[in-house]
Image (spheres, rainbow, N blue to C red):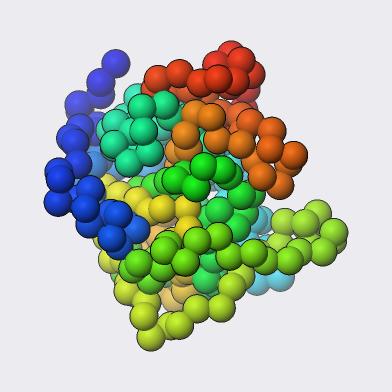
Amino acid sequence: MKHTEFFNYRKLTEDELKSFNENGFLVIKGILTAEGVDKMQSESMAAWGREKESFDPGKSWLQNSLLVNIHHQSPTVRDYYFEGPLVDIASQLIGPNIKGATSQLTFKMRGNTKPFGWHQDNGYGELDPYNALTTLTALDNTDRGNGCLWLIPGSHKQGQIKVHQDAEQKQTQSEIIVDADDSLAVAMEMQAGDALIFNCWMLHKSDGNYSSDRDRRILFLRYADADAVEVYNDQKPRLGRLVKGTTRFDEVREFEGDI
Ligand SMILES: O=C(O)CCC(=O)C(=O)O
């Protein structure tokens, strides 16, 4: 069911499709209505308050800034993830068959000064085919002062960057940071309700939130081809809800689990 009171549905134009192929990213202005932003903020904050403590510089990114599977706790995020405007947009960019691959909050609350260095999202759990999409929906206005995202336009063209992690790093899910030229970085300043979407090979990073009075709350959703497999996991199918089209994997077609 379409929730037009919360989400603005539209298709990408030919120019946007061309720009995505060339630059590897797009910003969709106002994908959430003001009411949609309010609703997601309040449902997300209820979950955040139940699960998270205040920022501790001694703790990891995972502990300070991530809350996974937020669609289990926020009905509005769930509708947006599985039936919102991003599903058709993902299908325009990936193809007719789409599954959800990740849903999480990445919240950098005021005073959370931890940066997140350059990386590709396909560096964390490589998926094949290499057309998975990250979507970041801003729940606050975000700029250089409160830890907005930065990316390097066109950097997706260098493909998968192999990073070696030892067994301990894998276990502790430590960050997988790569080298990149900061002089090429562009700040992705957004208004609450805008979405940034980019290819799985896009190099991106964020700085700390050094503001004293502005949170930087982002909803992170990832979509993949419905047949996408996990390269790091013996090519097993990535499990996630089928949101459009079909798949050759029974376990994905029947999936009703966590992701
Ligand atoms: O939320 C952020 O600041 C960075 C998040 C990010 O780049 C990621 O989760 O891949």
The C terminus is located in which quarter? top right
- Residue furthest right in the image: 167
Can the viewer see residue 55 in this picture? no
Direction from residue 177 to residue 131 in the image, left or right: left
Whole-percent x and y of residue 75?
43, 26
Return the residue nearer the eye: 19 or 185: 19
Direction from residue 90 to residue 109 in the image, left or right: right
Residue at horizontal 64 percent and vertical 49 percent from the top: 125
- Residue furthest bottom in the image: 183
Residue at horizontal 41 percent and vertical 68 percent from the top: 155
Residue at horizontal 65 percent and vertical 40 percent from the top: 230
Whole-percent x and y of residue 111?
50, 70
Number of numbered discs present? 0
Query: Would you identify the image quadrant in which residue 217 lies?
Result: bottom left
The N terminus is located in which quarter? top left
Can the viewer see residue 230 in this picture? yes
